[in-house]
Image: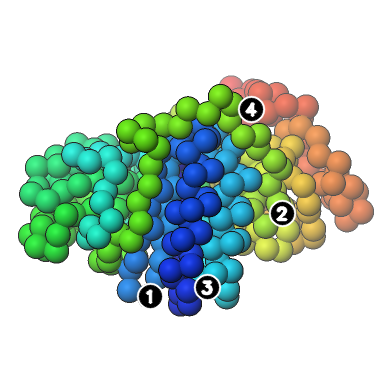
Amino acid sequence: MFLRVIRCLEVENLDAGLRLIREERAPAWHRMAGYRLSVVNRMDAEISLLTCWDTEDDERASYRSIIPIHDQVVEILTPAQAHSEAYQRVTMAGPATRPEAGSWVRTIVMEGLTISTLEATIRSYEDRVLPTFLSAPGMQTCLFGVDRVLGKAVAFSYWSDDASLRTSEAAVARLRQEIAEAYGLQVLDVAVGRLLLTDAPPGGGVATAPERARHEPISPADTRVELEQLGDESIAVVRIRGALDRFSSPRIKNILDRAMEAGVNALVIDPSGVISVDSSGVGILVGTLKRARREGGGLRLAGENAKLATILRMMSLDQMFPTDSSVPDAIMHFRSDTS
């Protein structure tokens, strides 16, 4: 399952925002394939809107619906302060797949996941945390998701009353500490709040639209970066979709740095989804190429992108980057170098 979280700070008109979600946006989601659940939480001064989808493709297909709700809700709730996060590999379990409005919710955010610890962290949650939660009185539903790009994990647990939530505190704190210590994670935030609004397709199942909405190209402001390490090899494939510019480059640099810290030194960059690029984005590629070479590897571009090719020529850097026609060709080149 795939989870998107829109966080709004310093809320100004909560009632109007909830009415918009209930009367206009949720009915549209019901008609979309893969829709599972939407929930609005209040954590002190922050309002969080969660939407759950069966797969990442379902969420991407809902893009035309997600962006309007983001823009409209943000405009009503908090014009100046809002941001969006995405979590993959989401686990959802509980006696009720649709928690009730008024329920208490606990949110835990952790960071420090690496390529090597991500799967083990998910298994620990499924094997150790879920049994503890599901046997606890008052437990309704729990969600756990990971962001493999930023190395973050988030957990939401919903409880029927305050007493149930408080009773579970000691066990949750113990498990949280054990998992953090086992996998080198840092707890960023633990918060308690209330569930204001919940919505799901009739019967709690998935939407049954005859066809899913078509996915439109994302805007430069919503750059997606996917990193895939090839088994236990030191090769990783990085796919960039969106902008490669001064706004996205710090995040992309962080992703590439973390991959290399985890032992990757051969990077295959697939730029086919890049829709805009500037000198800052090129600078990230140059710096990463130099670091990879220092560590005995390299960086290869796989596939064509006219915008990137143009700016590389303008900066006289086009000869600096080895280029292959496809990702498999670039991978084969790295493997042949080590054989």
Three-letter code for the amino acid on which mark 3 is drawn: Thr
Please tell me how many numbered marks the rendered image carries.
4
Marks 2 and 3, Cα distance to the nearest angstrom?
23 Å
Indicate how the structure is coloured in the image: rainbow
Tell me if 114 is positioned left or right of 43 in this view: right
Dot placed on the residue nearer the N-terminal end, 1 or 3: 1
Q: Secondary structure at mark 2?
A: loop
Residue 78's disc is 3
Marks 1 and 4, Cα distance to the nearest angstrom?
48 Å
Q: Secondary structure at mark 4?
A: helix
Say which residue appears at 32% left-offset and 39% top-offset.
Answer: 91
Task: Tell me if mark 1 has few (under 14), some (14-19) or many (20+) residues whose alpha carbon lies within 10 angstroms of its own.
Answer: few
In the rendered image, which residue does mark 4 sit on?
A: 331
The quarter of the image holding the C terminus is top right
Residue 220's disc is 2
Dot placed on the residue nearer the N-terminal end, 4 or 3: 3
Q: Secondary structure at mark 1?
A: loop
Give percent across and percent down for residue 146: 40, 46
Say which residue appears at 43% left-offset and 68% top-offset.
Answer: 15
Three-letter code for the amino acid on which mark 1 is drawn: Ala
Marks 1 and 3, Cα distance to the nearest angstrom?
11 Å
Residue 45's disc is 1
Dot placed on the residue nearer the N-terminal end, 1 or 4: 1
Give percent across and percent down for residue 150: 48, 53
